[in-house]
Image (spheres, helix red, strand yellow):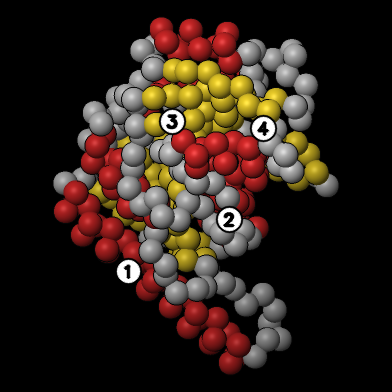
C-alpha cells in the first residue's frame, strides 16, 4: 500500500498506571504507519503520579507511594527506550516523552499534545477504567484531531479494506472526510448503513454519499444491513467487519450528557470496548 498523503506527524500515547508493562499494539501500529507514511512519530509514555493527600498518613505510607511512583517512572522510561530502538529498525524519525503527571494533568496534556499532530493512536483497553475512557474522550472532544484505537492483535498498520459505519449524520461525514488519506489508497471501501434500530429517514443515505467519495477516487460500495437478530447496531457492524476482514473501521462519535458528564454515544462506546479492527474515530 502506498503511503497515505498529508499525514506528517503521529502521536502514540500510553500510560503506566500500576500493572507491569504490557506490549503495546498502538506503538507497533504507529511505527508501521509512520514508516508507510514517512511521518514523524512521537511516543508519549506517561506514568501516573500518585500523591499522599493527608498529613496524618504515616511516613511509611508516604514512602510506599514514593517507591511506587519511582517504579512507574522506570516502566514508562523503559517503554520509551524500546520504542526509540524499534523506530531505528523501522527507519522512522521518533521523539519520545516520559511525563510523570497526576490524573488531571495526564488528561489535559494528552488533549493539548494531540492538537499538534495529524492523528493520535491509543491502545484499546479490554478492562475499561475511568482513566482509559477519559483519555479517549480527551482526544475525541478536545483535540480537534482524529483518533485511531487499536485492539489486541493488530500491531501492524493495514488499510486494504476499510468499513465505514454510516448513519448519515454530520459526525459520520466529518469522520469520513478526516479518513480520506486512508480511503483514497485502499483497495475496497464499504459504506455500511445498519437499519431497523433508529429512524434514518432524515439522514443522508449511503447511496447519496457514495458519489462524493467516488469523486475523490475512493473505490466505494454501499451496503444496507438490517440489525441482526439479538444484536444492536454496534454488534451488527462488528460482525460484518469480522466477516469481511476489514483492516479498519471508520465512525463518527457524538456525545450526550449523562449525570452532568459528557460521554460518547452508545455505538461508539460499544465498539471501543470490542472491535475486530482498528477504529478510526473523529467528532
Q: Nearer the viewer, residue 159 or 30?
A: 159
Residue 119 place in picture, x, y as percent: 42, 36
Instruction: Please report the residue visible at 48 percent of the width from the left and 7 percent of the height from the top.
Output: 211
The span from disc 4 to disc 3 (Cα, nearest Å) is 21 Å
Of badges 4 and 3, the one in the foreground is 3
- Label disc, if present, on residue 254 of the rendered structure: 4
Q: Earlier in the sequence, mark 3 or mark 2?
A: 2
Q: Say what secondary structure mark 2 lies in.
A: helix
Q: Earlier in the sequence, mark 2 or mark 1?
A: 1
Q: Are marks 1 and 3 in contact (CB under 8 Å)?
A: no
**Does residue 242 lie above or below 153 as drawn?**
above
Residue 195, quarter of picture: top right
Q: Nearer the viewer, residue 57 or 162?
A: 162
Left or right of 153 in this view: 66:
right
The span from disc 2 to disc 1 (Cα, nearest Å) is 21 Å
Q: Residues within 10 Å of mark 2 (few under 14, many from 20)?
A: some
Residue 128, quarter of picture: bottom right
Report which residue position mark 1 lands on. Answer: 78
The span from disc 4 to disc 2 (Cα, nearest Å) is 18 Å
Q: Nearer the viewer, residue 211 or 83?
A: 211
**Does residue 99 lie above or below 55 as drawn?**
above
Residue 172 place in picture, x, y as percent: 59, 24
Left or right of 229 in this view: 282:
left
Instruction: Please report the residue visible at 80 percent of the width from the left and 44 percent of the height from the top.
Output: 258
The span from disc 1 to disc 3 (Cα, nearest Å) is 34 Å
Q: Are marks 4 and 1 in contact (CB under 8 Å)?
A: no
> In the current view of this chain or complex, which residue is farthest to the front?
229
- The quarter of the rendered structure image containing the C terminus is top right
> In the current view of this chain or complex, which residue is farthest to the right?
259
Amino acid at each position: 500500500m502506498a503511503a497515505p498523503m498529508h499525514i506528517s506527524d503521529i502521536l502514540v500515547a500510553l500510560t503506566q498506571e500500576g500493572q507491569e508493562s504490557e506490549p503495546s499494539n498502538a506503538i507497533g501500529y504507529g511505527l508501521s504507519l509512520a514508516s508507510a507514511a514517512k511521518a514523524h512519530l512521537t511516543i508519549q509514555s506517561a506514568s501516573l503520579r500518585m500523591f499522599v493527600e493527608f498529613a496524618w498518613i504515616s511516613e511509611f505510607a508516604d514512602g510506599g507511594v514514593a517507591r511506587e511512583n519511582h517504579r512507574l517512572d522506570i516502566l514508562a522510561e523503559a517503554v520509551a527506550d524500546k520504542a526509540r530502538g524499534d523506530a531505528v529498525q523501522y527507519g522512522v524519525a521518533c521523539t519520545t516523552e516520559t511525563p510523570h503527571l497526576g490524573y488531571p494533568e495526564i488528561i489535559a496534556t494528552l488533549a493539548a499534545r494531540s492538537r499538534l499532530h495529524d492523528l493520535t493512536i491509543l491502545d484499546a483497553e479490554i478492562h475499561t477504567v475511568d482513566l482509559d475512557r477519559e483519555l479517549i474522550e480527551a482526544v475525541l472532544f478536545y483535540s480537534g484531531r482524529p483518533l485511531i484505537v487499536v485492539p489486541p492483535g493488530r500491531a501492524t498498520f493495514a488499510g486494504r479494506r476499510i468499513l465505514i459505519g454510516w448513519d448519515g449524520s454530520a459526525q459520520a461525514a466529518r469522520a469520513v472526510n478526516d479518513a480520506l488519506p486512508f480511503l483514497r489508497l485502499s483497495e475496497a471501501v464499504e459504506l455500511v448503513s445498519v437499519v431497523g434500530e433508529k429512524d434514518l429517514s432524515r439522514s443522508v443515505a449511503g447511496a447519496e454519499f457514495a458519489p462524493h467519495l467516488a469523486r475523490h477516487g475512493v473505490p466505494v460500495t454501499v451496503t444496507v444491513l438490517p440489525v441482526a437478530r439479538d444484536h444492536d447496531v454496534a454488534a451488527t457492524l462488528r460482525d460484518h467487519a469480522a466477516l469481511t476482514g476489514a483492516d479498519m473501521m471508520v465512525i463518527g462519535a457524538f456525545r450526550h450528557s449523562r449525570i452532568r458528564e459528557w460521554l460518547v454515544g452508545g455505538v461508539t462506546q460499544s465498539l471501543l470496548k470490542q472491535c475486530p479492527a482498528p477504529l478510526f474515530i473523529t467528532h
